[in-house]
Every structure is written in C-alpha cells, then in structure tokens.
Amino acid sequence: MVINECQVCGATEWTALPDPNKHQSVTTASRILNEPLGKSQCNSCGFVQRTRIEFLGLTDYYEQDYATYYERPGTDLFHKKRYAAIVDWMKSYLDPASSLKKQIDIGCGQGWAMEAIREYYPGSVIEGLEPSHYNVKIAREKGFRIYEGKMEDTEVESGSYDLVFSNNVIQHVNNAKAFLLQLKTLLADDGVMVITCPDGSRPNIEILWGDQNFSFLPMNLLKLAEDIGFKTVFWTSSADSPSLPPAQLLLMTNNKNYEHLHLNRDAMDIPLADIFRKRADYLSSFEKINEYLMQHIPEGAKVYNFGASYWTSVLAAYCPDYWKKTTACLVDEDTGNSKFLGKDVQLYNSITPGENDVLVIGTGPGWQKNLQEKLSGKWKNIVTWDSFINY
C-alpha cells in the first residue's frame, strides 16, 4: 500500500524529489534496498513523504532487521554520547524530577536515552516500548521494563505517564498523526510529551534513508501537534553539528507550568520553493559524487574507504560504481566486525598504501577536511567529497 495523501494537510498533489540512485536506496540500519528512495514534497505544506514506494513499517523490518543499526563498527560510543546529548536537550525544558515520576520512551532501542534520563531522574519509573526483538532483550538486560511491539499494536497503560518521549521515531512510523494521538493517550492529565526528529528545513542525511518515511518542516510538526489539541506547544531547533543531523524538538502539554514557553512562528516560516530546490540539489549530488570519485581512482589502484558506518552505507547505495571499486573499509579500532556491506573491515594501521592506492574519506562531510589533514602523512592520494553537499 502506497499512501498518497499528505499526512499533515491531507493534500494529494506532490512534486517528486530526485532519487539519488534509480535502482536502490539504503536504510538507517545499513540495509541496501533494491528500490529507489521514492520521496516527494507536498505542494501545499512542504511535507516530504515516501509516496512512490511502500513503507518498510508495513513489513517486519523493525522487528527483525533494525537491530543491526546498533551493531555497526564503532556505534557503541557514538550512541551513548548521542542520546546523552538528546536527553540533556530535553531536560533543559522539563520540570524538576519531582513532577516526572513515571516516564516512557517510545521506540527506546537498546535503552540509550533511558540510561541517560535515569541519571537526571533517578527516582522515576522509566519504561520503554520497542519493536525490535533484539533491542528489547538488550534494554531489559539493563534493568528496564520494556513493552515489545509497535505503538499501534501494543497495550501500554493509558493516562498514567508524566513524561512521554520519543526520539527519532516519528519519521519512521506509518501514520504520523495517529502516532501522536496514541502517545497522547498515555499522558497523565498534567503530563508532558516530547518529540525529537531531524529538522527537515535543513536538508541532511536523514532524507536519504529509505526507512524514514517523512521529513518534517517545523511548520509540519506544529500543525500535527495543534491538530490533536494541546494548550502549550513549544518548538526549538538544535545548533549545527558536524557529527549529528540538525534536529528539532517539540514539547506538548496541557500543564500550566509550561505556559512560559513561547513559540516563535517566524522561525518556522520557510518558502516551499526554496526548500524544494535545496532538497533536490542535495539528493542529486550523489550522482556527481559517484562520478567525481571514479575520476580520482587510477587504473589498477587499491581503493580504501575510511569508515564503516552511516556515511559509508550512503556511499555504498548511492555511489555504486565507487563501491564496486572499493577494496576494504578502514577503521581506527578493532570492532569485531569483519565485513561491512560485503567489504572487508580492516584496521587503518594495518595497511601500508601503495604509490597509486587511494583513501576515500567515507565519514560525515563535516569531518572530512580535518581527517584529510590528519591522514595526509601516510597517504599520497586522499579523496574528499564534502564540497558537493551542504552540511
């Protein structure tokens, strides 16, 4: 089932966004899909939706395959820091712990955010909901009570939580408005709901994932929140970071203690034609990156990709000619992973490059210049591609 009605405004007129690759796409769990990205922008409200390809949430992807998201080389430390930062961001707008005695994390993964929030609210009951069988097992081993399943299929106690939070989940669900409505039913009368997700007003890596059905402009999130009837709705956006996609935070409540939070609607006003152009340019850049990388690979050279995570999987999916040429992925530390998307994973220090061998920086664009400088003493041929996209 392909959903062609905009889940924010109900319109049915879309403009197709370019597919980075016409034959395949990639998920946040580094799974290559044999189908294009298939996303479009709503002509009325600028919401991005996967309109030409079915949602993966209609399959067993999240129950069976999504746990690999946490098992890639080097992700353990990355996620611990990432979710600690998200929780710190949330906490800056929340009441003291005394008013948040019972909390639930919707889409809790392996419990990273729950561990972080437990440090701030040690006396609170903190529970989670998660569809992945493997992630549930890990989170339960950390001592948390976890409901297993998707929100729409799981019986969670309604009307009992002082804080309902969900980080980077709403862009994955099948029905965004229904998801928020279901979360609202979990709240106590004075409860607070916090949603974080990528900020779709600044095109970035999040729009490249095939399992992320939606990209939300700030005004899209605001409309969904106001449509389901909260008295206080507060929105803010994160500062730019070279390591994390730009994010937005939405707080919703009927609690009078939050009436001091003022919404700046001017910051959410974005011309739709401008954002479409930026999104289209971003998505189209990978064909150029593929061509550029191929131009910088000498005949007969060994090609090494520095990295084996997020951005490397993007290159594998959307720069397929380059990926075919890649000999191995190099990492700084032994992660126990011998393969990444069919390529050997080797320690960086174990490689002595030949005269013509090439090192391609396969990390986030924001880190590439620093890495190039750091690695230039060992490698004669280092290729970066950060000039092709904004970050």
Image: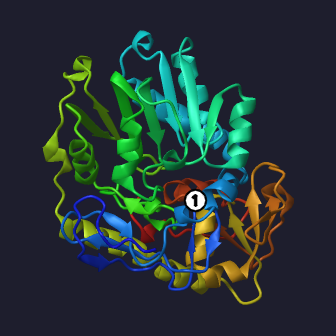
- Return the x and y of residue 229 as percentages of the image width and height: 22, 38
The residue lying toward the viewer, choosing from 390 and 208, is 208
- Return the x and y of residue 153 as percentages of the image width and height: 54, 48
Q: Is residue 109 above or below residue 279?
A: above
Residue displayed at 42% across by 60% down: 204
Taking the image as shown, residue 158 lies to the left or right of residue 368, namely left
The residue lying toward the viewer, choosing from 310 and 28, is 28
Q: Kindly identify which residue carries mark 1.
A: 28
| Residue 25 falls in image quadrant | bottom right
Q: Secondary structure at mark 1?
A: loop
The residue lying toward the viewer, choosing from 182 and 300, is 182
| Residue 7 falls in image quadrant | bottom left
Q: Is residue 248 visible?
A: no
The residue lying toward the viewer, choosing from 189 and 273, is 189
| Residue 98 falls in image quadrant | top left
Residue displayed at 70% across by 82% down: 324
The colour scheme is rainbow
Quarter of the figure that contains the C terminus: bottom left
Residue displayed at 65% across by 54% down: 63
- Return the x and y of residue 286 as percentages of the image width and height: 48, 77
Taking the image as shown, residue 107 lies to the left or right of residue 308, namely left
Residue sticking out furthest to the left: 266
Q: Is residue 48 above or below residue 234?
A: below
Q: Is residue 339 above or below residue 37?
A: above
Q: Is residue 373 above or below residue 185?
A: below
Taking the image as shown, residue 143 lies to the left or right of residue 90, namely right
- Return the x and y of residue 325 as percentages of the image width and height: 71, 82
The total of numbered circles placed on residues is 1
Label 1 CA crowd tier, 10 Å (few <14, some 14–19, many 20+): many
Q: Is residue 387 visible?
A: yes
Amino acid bearing label 1: Thr
